[in-house]
Image: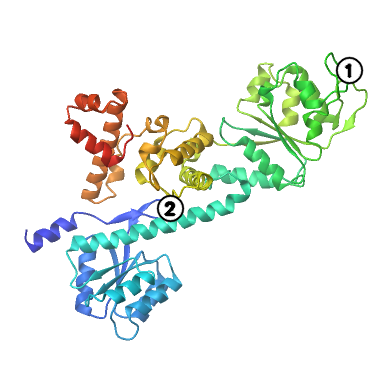
């Protein structure tokens, strides 16, 4: 293949792109620094032909000016230059912006200098004369991807720290920002709050955050699942009774409202509250007093009430299953909690939060979720919401064989919903070879997984149905680390 054929082939590959901090695919920005102008222009042409965005400088001082003026993914830097040499420039760059990945170039094969450079923060080094354009592009692209992944991880860690005061309530999507603002707004008020959201959206976590963020933080927080208490006992359990109030009441009980005195009580699944208890609760909220069963005395109540439900209480009210007066008492402030499918951008943040949580709890050092596993997680609809995701990550930490979560470590219920191949318009952002490789990988993973599912996990039967040699079928299983 001639020189012009090679140039044409490289030119058709499009821009070299990788995932940025915000998850978007963007071109890789490279600053090349070398005092040999002819060599500098040659490297510039190679990288531009390969689709990189390239800026050049012939000395250390000029490169620092360019770095201060604009962001760069990779600094491709000559080690030996007059004035400020490459090692000195490397140290200055890392002091200014540790996110810039540095690849050093040296014509001397100086092992000691290369080791010193790696210790000072260089990502890699190339030996002059440089290799093929593909080899140069591979090293530069790998450095850029590493740097962007590190930057994204730092951003995720920072967001996790910001949200740490909310416990496991993680998210930066618009629906979750609304929830955080609502929590901060109502925390210091005395008003009753109604939390509405599907199972697994974190209603108890939000209620606990409201409690912990307000004046009652030092008081008790008492969560109550109204559906878990027998209907004939619920009034006694909630509001208490005196001795002899009814047959079997051999001793007085203060009830759960009494236990929450000075703090907050969460009435989860409030729609399961029977009619009699609804009446009592309405009068407690109206008058601020509580009267135990069998007692003629009313006591002032110092309890904040937060109610939670996953049903439409307005509809229940219209169907005469829920009291209208109680509904309006409870819903003074209503906070809707979004399902995970409506805040998909929060899913990776949540996944890494739970990965960190359960890795620490189990004593394992699992630091990463593979791109393939993350694609599976993104494809799932999460009917069980955040609770389902948490359980999936906990299970994956237990099942993982190495230090990375792979698709085979995920629960079958999650992997079974694996998405079809990526749409062509998403692959068009990639160079042809990378797009083709990704499409083939996605096809293999989806096809082999489905055939194993159909065959009940029997590899021989799955290979037979696929009309593939069993050894080739197993090779694909090993390649994608699919559990059988």
Please state which of residues 195 and 250 is positioned toward the viewer in this rendering.
Answer: 250
Q: Look at mark 2 in the image and give the residue it sits on.
A: 22
Please provide percent x and percent y for residue 254: 83, 29
* Quarter of the image that includes the N terminus: bottom left
Which secondary structure, mark 2?
Answer: loop
Tell me the quarter of the picture where residue 449 sits: top left
Please give the name of the residue rendered at 36% of the width and 37% of the height, measured from the top-left corner. 408
Q: Nearer the viewer, mark 1 or mark 2?
A: 1
Please state which of residues 45 and 36 is positioned toward the viewer in this rendering.
Answer: 36
Please give the name of the residue rendered at 75% of the width and 16% of the height, measured from the top-left corner. 232
Q: Is residue 241 left or right of residue 121?
A: right
Please provide percent x and percent y for residue 287: 85, 30
The correct choice, above or below, for 115 with respect to 207 in the image is below
Looking at the image, how many numbered discs can be counted on the residues? 2
Q: Within 10 Å of the Cα at label 2, are there few (<14), some (14-19), or many (20+) other Cα atoms?
A: few
Q: Is residue 4 left or right of residue 401?
A: left
Q: Spatial distance from mark 1 to mark 2, Cα to Cα? A: 65 Å
């Amino acid at each position: 293949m001639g020189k012009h054929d090679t140039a044409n082939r490289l030119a058709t590959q499009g821009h070299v792109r990788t995932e940025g901090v915000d998850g978007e695919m963007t071109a890789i920005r490279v600053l090349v620094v070398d005092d040999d102008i002819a060599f500098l222009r040659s490297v510039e042409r190679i990288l531009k032909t390969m689709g990189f965005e390239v800026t050049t400088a012939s000395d250390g001082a000029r490169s620092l000016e360019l770095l201060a003026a604009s962001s760069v993914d990779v600094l491709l830097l000559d080690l030996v230059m007059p004035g400020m040499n490459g090692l000195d420039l490397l140290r200055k760059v890392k002091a200014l912006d540790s996110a810039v990945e540095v690849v050093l170039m040296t014509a001397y094969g100086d092992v000691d200098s290369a080791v010193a450079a790696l210790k000072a923060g260089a990502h890699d080094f190339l030996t002059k004369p440089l290799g093929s354009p593909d080899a140069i592009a591979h090293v530069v692209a790998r450095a850029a991807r590493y740097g962007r992944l590190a930057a994204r991880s730092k951003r995720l860690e920072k967001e996790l720290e910001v949200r740490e005061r909310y416990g496991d309530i993680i998210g930066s999507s618009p629906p979750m920002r609304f929830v955080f603002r609502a929590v901060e707004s109502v925390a210091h008020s005395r008003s009753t709050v109604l939390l509405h959201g599907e199972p697994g959206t974190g209603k108890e976590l939000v209620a606990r955050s409201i409690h912990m963020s307000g004046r009652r933080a030092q008081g008790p927080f008492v969560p109550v699942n109204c559906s878990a208490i027998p209907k004939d006992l619920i009034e006694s359990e909630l509001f208490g009774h005196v001795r002899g109030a009814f047959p079997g009441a051999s001793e007085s009980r203060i009830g759960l409202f009494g236990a929450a005195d000075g703090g907050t009580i969460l009435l989860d699944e409030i729609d399961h509250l029977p009619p009699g208890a609804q009446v009592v609760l309405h009068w407690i909220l109206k008058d601020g007093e509580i009267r135990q069963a069998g007692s003629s005395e009313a006591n002032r109540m110092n309890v904040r009430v937060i109610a939670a439900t996953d049903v439409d209480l307005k509809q229940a009210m219209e169907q005469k299953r829920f009291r209208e007066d109680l509904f309006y008492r409870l819903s003074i402030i209503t906070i809707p909690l979004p399902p995970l499918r409506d805040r998909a951008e929060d899913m990776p943040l949540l996944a890494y939060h739970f990965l960190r949580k359960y890795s620490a709890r189990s004593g394992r050092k699992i630091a990463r979720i593979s791109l393939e596993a993350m694609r599976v997680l993104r494809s799932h609809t999460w009917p069980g919401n955040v609770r389902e995701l948490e359980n999936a990550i906990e299970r994956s930490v237990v099942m993982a064989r190495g230090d990375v979560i792979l698709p085979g470590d995920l629960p079958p219920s999650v992997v079974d919903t694996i998405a079809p191949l990526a749409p062509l318009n998403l692959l068009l952002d990639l160079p042809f070879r990378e797009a083709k490789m990704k499409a083939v990988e996605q096809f293999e993973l989806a096809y082999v997984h489905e055939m194993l599912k159909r065959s009940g996990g029997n590899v021989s039967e799955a290979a037979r149905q696929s009309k593939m040699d069993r050894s080739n079928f197993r090779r694909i299983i090993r390649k994608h680390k699919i559990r059988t």
